Image (cartoon, rainbow, N blue to C red):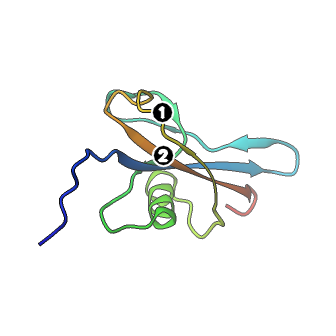
C-alpha cells in the first residue's frame, strides 16, 4: 500500500540555463513557451519532473525535447521555491547550467 502524505506536495520542475560561446560573444539559449499561462513568453528550456525520474535526467530530457541539445555537461546550481512565483500552483524549480561551444553544437 503506498504511503499517503498529510500535506500537499508542490510540483517539481527543472530549468536549463545554457550559455553558448562562439569565440566572440556569449549567448543564452531561450525557448518560446507554447502553453498558457506563459504562452509566447521567452524562457529557459525546462519542464516538470516525471514520477520516478531523477532531476538531472529530467533536465537532460527537457533540454533535448525543447532544443535538440544532447550530451552536454549540466551542473546543478540553484533551487527556487517561493510558493507564489507560479500561477499554476506551488512549484519548486531546480536549475542547471552549462557552457557550450556554439561552433560544436
Q: Tell which residue pokes out farthest to the front in this image.
A: 6
Residue plotted at (52% across, 31% down) = 42
Q: Please report whichever mark, 1 or 2, sits nearer to the chain's N-terminal start.
A: 1
Q: Position of residue 2 (x, y in %)?
A: 16, 69
Residue plotted at (66% across, 66% down) = 73
Quadrant housing the N terminus = bottom left
Q: 53 or 43: which is nearer to us?
A: 53
How crowded pointer 2 is (Cα within 10 Å; few <14, some 14-19, many 20+) is rated as many
Q: 42 or 95: which is nearer to us?
A: 95
Q: Position of residue 30 (x, y in %)?
A: 57, 40
Q: Is residue 50 above or below residue 85?
A: below
The reply, left or right, for residue 35 in relation to residue 18 is left
Residue plotted at (51% across, 46% down) = 45
Q: Which residue is mark 2?
A: 93
Q: CA distance from mark 1 to mark 2?
A: 10 Å
Quadrant housing the C terminus = bottom right
Q: Are marks 1 and 2 in contact (CB under 8 Å)?
A: no
Q: Which residue is mark 1?
A: 82
The reply, left or right, for residue 63 in relation to residue 25 is left
Amino acid at each position: 500500500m503506498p504511503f499517503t502524505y498529510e500535506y500537499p506536495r508542490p510540483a517539481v520542475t527543472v530549468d536549463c540555463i545554457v550559455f553558448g560561446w562562439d569565440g566572440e560573444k556569449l549567448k543564452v539559449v531561450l525557448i518560446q513557451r507554447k502553453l498558457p499561462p506563459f504562452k509566447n513568453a521567452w524562457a529557459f528550456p525546462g519542464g516538470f519532473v516525471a514520477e520516478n525520474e531523477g532531476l538531472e535526467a529530467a533536465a537532460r530530457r527537457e533540454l533535448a525535447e525543447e532544443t535538440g541539445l544532447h550530451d552536454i555537461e549540466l551542473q546543478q546550481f540553484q533551487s527556487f521555491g517561493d510558493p507564489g512565483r507560479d500561477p499554476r500552483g506551488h512549484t519548486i524549480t531546480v536549475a542547471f547550467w552549462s557552457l557550450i561551444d556554439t561552433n560544436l553544437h
